[in-house]
Amino acid sequence: MKLAELGEFGLIDRIAQQVAAAPSVPLGIGDDAAALLPTPENLTLITCDMLLEGVHFDLNFCDPHSLGRKSLAVNISDLAAMGAVPRHCLLGIALPAAVPVEFMDGFMTGMLEMAGSFGVTLVGGDTCASKGGIAISITALGEQRPERVLKRSGAKAGDLVYVSGTVGDAAAGLKELRSGRREGFLVSRQLDPTPRVAAGVAVAEAGLASAMIDVSDGVLSDLGHICEMSKVAARVELARLPLSDEYRALCGDDLSLALSGGEDYELLFCVPQGRGEAVEELFGRLGLAVTRVGAIVEGSGIELVAADGSLHQPGARGFDHFG
Amino acid sequence: MKLAELGEFGLIDRIAQQVAAAPSVPLGIGDDAAALLPTPENLTLITCDMLLEGVHFDLNFCDPHSLGRKSLAVNISDLAAMGAVPRHCLLGIALPAAVPVEFMDGFMTGMLEMAGSFGVTLVGGDTCASKGGIAISITALGEQRPERVLKRSGAKAGDLVYVSGTVGDAAAGLKELRSGRREGFLVSRQLDPTPRVAAGVAVAEAGLASAMIDVSDGVLSDLGHICEMSKVAARVELARLPLSDEYRALCGDDLSLALSGGEDYELLFCVPQGRGEAVEELFGRLGLAVTRVGAIVEGSGIELVAADGSLHQPGARGFDHFG
């Protein structure tokens, strides 16, 4: 069956039937707007990301299920980077009317699976016919107490710079997909990223970080955002960049994807001196790698520190949509 | 200058500079997520609408300024239909990199003008390059006390059905645009609709309605949504449909656009018997026309009542994106 046969309202009903009720959602899918019950004394954190066919995803590389998972994951990652607990989301999706209903079913199964993993309820959105490719727009909402919210702007000279997990994998996975591979660790890091929610919330609630961001544009670009917003500079020790064995096997000593490749959705954050050990203990308990990769210094911009201690200016920084 | 020269982050900075600070937005544009301060004892109402070039708008018919205005207006209208006070919005927009910066400036001027008219603050969003046409996704948030929120599901047999303003104008305006006209009342009703915020909030706060919706898909389709959600039927008196002089001049006695044309963004609502006079007084004070067009009855579906009292089943109902 094609979406054209199911119709817009049939599709909305089909989606609504897959969503369980939640106490924080007095009114969910099916009205002009959804109604949410905010938790007293919490801020609402809200973010929105678009994913376009041919720009953000290629249906030759991903199936509808992993596309659904990733579409929500990248938004949840933005909430994690604020230290927020994800709560709700809205889905806007435009598809050609000739798309089979099975595509949408696969997409929704993946998206709702990701939502369920992080306690997120789909509360509304918009569906429409596209005359071009598929366009997805997800808005995700989370909550956190005001004093715990982690901005990009709080880094201070002397802070340590940490990153969770390993970096460069997602960009390396895209390189593999483009050369014909369809599976493996790097490919799954590209197609099915895991937002670091538990870690982001734990860092925020323990008050361990001065600033945080998720690695969506690339380490240099995202650390650059922290530096600009905090009016500081950073030094990154190249020898300390956490690389997976699979990254090393594919890229050898070439760090360009680890520095400038995006979409790892790891957390990059700044930690006041003296709190590094507490960060490492916390991540140990969470079972997630964390690595000190550099430090915040006075000034502006980012310098790279080579293994021999020499300083270098980075070349390309990261992804710019219009660049 | 093209967007390609300004770059993604240059564009975001340019937008951020046009947005004033607001007490309810502790953290606005420029971080991973925005932070909003909910008003105690209010629900958050949230809605999302996509607008796609070639589907929802045609750049041969509209300029960037009116596109910006309408893109936000249709979302604010959804909040008005819940009786909510609009507060915040997020903008996701995908544009080809070759689009001139002036297009985006015009769009933002229009959108922020509409936002300012209704006390709405832009708090975040996403910008990206499109390989196809322009895709816009706006999420709008509002607030209202739980007991005042107006759903689609509260209509009861015996209620009166009211509609604000006049209906069919926007569809008639689209017909005019397609035949070459570029201005006039009907065209402006299509290109620059006014969300009925003051009326929606006033009806909710006065507790005058049992159910409300905005006329986006067409009177029959939208009243049909109320009937389905409320498990009731409705009768519409054709002779009572509020038509503008301009609609009558273009369409004569043909009511098809008034019944099934969408995008008027008027309020359609159900009022318990005995409260009709209060509704008419309230709209009199607001200086907005309001017309009783029918009644809710038991059963399902919609019947049309002709001037001679005979009953008819409607034909086409309204817009279905995949239909």
Image: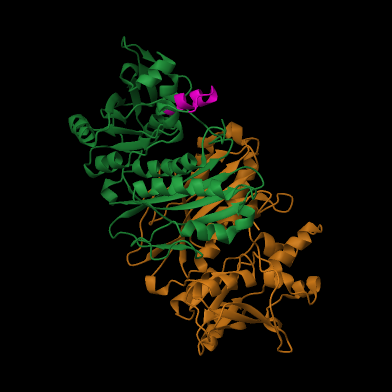
Chain colours: A green, B orange
Res A282 → quadrant: top left
Res. B23 in view: yes
Res A121 → quadrant: bottom left
Residue A178 within the segment the image draws in magenta: yes
Residue A8 within the segment the image draws in magenta: no
Q: Position of residue B186 (x, y in %)?
A: 73, 66
Query: How would you classify the magenta stretch by its main secondary structure?
Result: helix
Q: Residue at x 38, y 21 (%)?
A: A246
Q: Which residues are magenta?
A: A170-182
* Front in this rendered view, residue B304 or A214: B304
Above or below, A319 relative to B253: above
Q: Position of residue B19 (x, y in %)?
A: 49, 50
Please state if B35 lies on the left or on the right of B10 as rendered. left
Q: Position of residue A189 (x, y in %)?
A: 41, 31
Res. B110 in view: no
Q: Residue at x 48, y 69 (%)?
A: B82
Query: Looking at the rendering, in which quadrant would you find the C terminus of chain A?
Result: top right
Please state if A164 lies on the left or on the right of B241 as rendered. left
* Front in this rendered view, residue B316 or A42: B316
Residue farthest toward the top in the current orientation of the protein:
A308
Res A249 → quadrant: top left
Above or below, B164 relative to A51: below
Above or below, B115 relative to B16: below
Q: Position of residue A228 (x, y in %)?
A: 40, 33
Please state if B232 lies on the left or on the right of A314 as rendered. right
* Front in this rendered view, residue A185 or B109: A185
Q: Residue at x 60, y 33 (%)?
A: B4
